[in-house]
Amino acid sequence: MIPSDAPGAPGSRPVLLSDYRAPAWRIEHVELACDLDIDASEIRARLALRRNGAGAAPLRLDGEGLALRSINLDGRALEPGEYMLDAEGLTVPGARDGSVLETVVRVEPAKNTALEGLYLSGPRETGFLLTQCEAQGFRRITYCLDRPDVLARYTVTLRADRARFPVLLANGNPDGAGALPDGRHWARFVDPHPKPSYLFALVAGRLEHIERDYVTAEGRAVKLRIFAEADAIGRCGYALDALERAMRWDERVYGRNYDLDVFHIVATHDFNMGAMENKGLNIFNAKYLLADPDATTDDEYRQIEAVVAHEYFHNWTGNRVTCRDWFQLSLKEGLTVFREQSFSADMGSPALKRIEDVSTLRRAQFPEDAGPLAHAVRPAQYCEINNFYTATVYEKGAELVRMLAGRLGADGFRRGTDLYFARHDGQAVTVEDFLKALGDANGLDLMPYLDWYRQAGTPRVRAREVYDAATRSYALTLGQHTPPTPGQAQKRPLPIPLRVALFARDGRLLPLRLEGEAAAAGEERVLELTAAEQTFRFVDVPEPPLPSLLRGFSAPVIVESDEAPADLAFRLRHESDGYNRWDAGQRLAQLAFDAALRGGPGTALVAWCEALAALFDDAALDAALLAELLTPPSAVELGERCAELDPDAVHEARETLENSLAARLGAALEPRYRALHAQADGTLDAAAQARRRLKRRVLDLLCRHDPARGHASARLQFDGAHGMTDRLAALAALVRSGAREAGDALARYRRRYDGNALALDKWFALQAQVPAATALQRVQALMRDPAFTLRNPNRVYALLRSYAQGNPVGFHRADGAAYFWLVERLRELDAINPSVAARLATAFNGWRRLEPVRRRQAQQALAALAADAPRLSRDLADILERTLA
Ligand code: ARG
Ligand code: ZN
């Protein structure tokens, strides 16, 4: 591993946004010559330097874990006293404006288990070399100004043994290749677009590829190529199709065209994150690229399409216009996630997509916002930037862009992004620049939205209503408050767009006319809540209406309302918009859960079951939407409702919901299952996917209602499945319902997919998530499976993260055994891959809200690890320190 020279968090100073200074130096041109090999690679860098501004600061370059072999300034070798080396970089006092600095360093790819910088993917005999630079990996490859506001043109020459490394790739356009003595060869790439160092990438190894010709709307001919190892190249076709769809969409919807002669994507099984948008050379975690009907589920097909699009969209939102500093990370990530979500909505069902995105936000981001790691979409400080690739920066950031887009309307938003690209192409900019461009293009001041970027925590919106029959008026009073978060005790009111409608008792929507308006303006409108409290008075309201608030989830807030179970059930039956209907059902399920937890009366539960039973027979309802309606909120979301969390009690109460629903649907389940199963095929069209989604849900309920029939059906489905969606759903049903057949099915799956890493990950993840007191023993046993390794991030996430973050009952044991066990795994993992260890450690996020017995155990386990902070990575120490603060 590349030694992490940075000290642990206690000693390390945070980086502050308020300390930002423009760089004292610029680099006009980076020329790299890389002699690549598994154990040692030699990187020769030639930097054309410029002073930036009038200052006299000496040249200071970032560099970590590099062995410096030689250093030349303007053609002259420097003496030891002419430069200063330390653990974080290199100072060269003699550099002047216009100087050229040449360094030669040696790095050790095979020892790099942190997977940042230059590393080896796969076994040393057959694997390939690749890089990951975002956020600060380039400094592990060569000495440089490793910050996003230094944009340089790159020329990269790669040299390696031809037999061992037949394919050589870097960013930009190919610019020649040829043979060298001793069986070696070279290839050169020139990237005409100035870019920050975090977008640098190279790849070298034995890779196959598929390709397709593409012509952009502007007429540029582009070769699209996807590279993968021989056993994976047959699974890249779907991603290539998705790429083409994404490119066309970006031309049509944002007017953005691709800007190089080649667009390359490479798949690897060894990757810390999902994928990386390196200019013209995207690198993907295989999980988000490889697809085949036998091993890929419907959900995964959709994810692959989304991630391929996401990385492609970064070419404009991230690469052509990049971030000034890492505090602005959401400038590119929030915007790109929003673009990706819009694309996916267009490719499939917008209502379903919205349901999925909101439920992800509630499961992943709301808990983050409510816990010790809460941070603003644009944080004001960080110790380790790797720890800020979070649901807040990505998903909440996307919601902020969605609010802005909603405020401007489709045409206004397009005018805004057009101006943003025109004004800032080739620049490294800030969130303010983004808001300013969107505002300027529309003659609006959007700066009030900046508070959304600066303020952490999920706002609560409370609604009170008064209907006055005498004046036929309806007053809706909306109040907002945001709970305190670490370091931010006081919160300001935010501009909150609330899309609302009013239902009449017959299920129709009422025309909306606010007091003082001449006429009604439609049946749905956006109320802008800007103060701590505001009253909106509707007139001409013929009867006490039923309000439908936050339609389409128009702002990332929690609406606290006292809506009665009967009213929620009414909206669950009558809402015309899929998202609102789903949300009404979720709220009703939450009320049913609250009552079950307190052992209170089951009014809400009955209302929920009755409404769903009616919808179950509604032939007009889309099958996929029905599947979502039939699913109560996750245990994680429900746990967020508890002031003091007992995961066992949450689980029991949620089981009451599931079992009651299964009992209510009862005899209707099996025929529905059979009807859906009779239509089973392996096709990927929306209707077939929707049927599989509903079938999975119906099978789960059937296994509860009638285990004998449920298990028999699941067994048949497992044996005869047309594809992975049905196979995995059947396996999950057997395992989760404790079927006798489960063990045998698991063993057969294990054998069938031996050697298929992505399929095995699903096998590990499924078992890690079975809610049972014995989950820890099961996970420990799975760690002894020959296919398990702590060195592969996907495997670690599949087993350890699925357990620690996806199995509250199994992980949060009252005896604390799982906490102490996880802490030991974190120690081991930290020595291998700090960023994966840090990510896994966020499983302790909610520890302070646990009931007292578990809380004490968690605190002890965490404190024991934190006591070792000086020996831990900065990544892990930072998470621990903030979690315990
Ligand atoms: N920019 C990549 C994306 O689009 C993620 C890079 C993650 N890198 C990291 N150091 N955490 O999602
Ligand atoms: Zn991204």
Image (cartoon, rainbow, N blue to C red):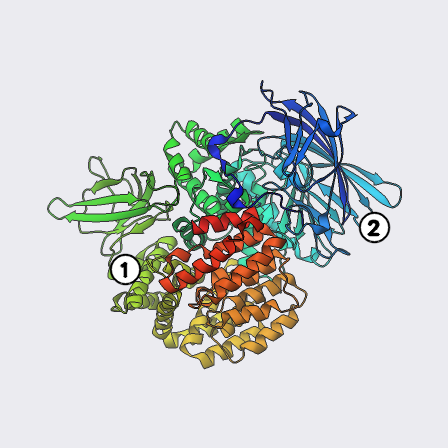
Is 411 drawn above or below residue 282 in the view shown?
A: above
* Image coords of residue 360 (percent x, y): 45, 54
* Res 459 quadrant in image: top left
Is 93 drawn above or below residue 767 in the view shown?
A: above
The answer to which of marks 1 and 2 sits earlier in the sequence is 2
Task: Name the amino acid, label 1.
Answer: Phe
Q: Which residue is mark 1?
A: 570
Is 423 drawn above or below residue 680 in the view shown?
A: above
In this orientation, which residue lies closer to the viewer: 401 or 847? 847
CA distance separating discs 1 and 2:
69 Å
Residue in the picture at 52% in, 80% down: 740
In this orientation, which residue lies closer to the viewer: 420 or 876? 876
* Image coords of residue 667 (percent x, y): 38, 77
In this orientation, which residue lies closer to the viewer: 143 or 347? 143
Tag 1 and tag 2, C-beta contact below 8 Å: no
Residue in the picture at 41% in, 38% down: 454
Is 363 drawn above or below residue 821 in the view shown?
A: above
* Res 715 quadrant in image: bottom right
Q: Residues within 10 Å of mark 1 (few under 14, many from 20)?
A: many
Secondary structure of residue under mark 2: loop
In this orientation, which residue lies closer to the viewer: 391 or 516? 391
Q: Is residue 531 left or right of residue 289?
A: left
Task: Name the amino acid, label 2.
Answer: Ala
* Image coords of residue 45 (percent x, y): 73, 33
Q: Residue 163 shows which numbered tag? A: 2
In this rendering, does residue 313 appear at all? yes
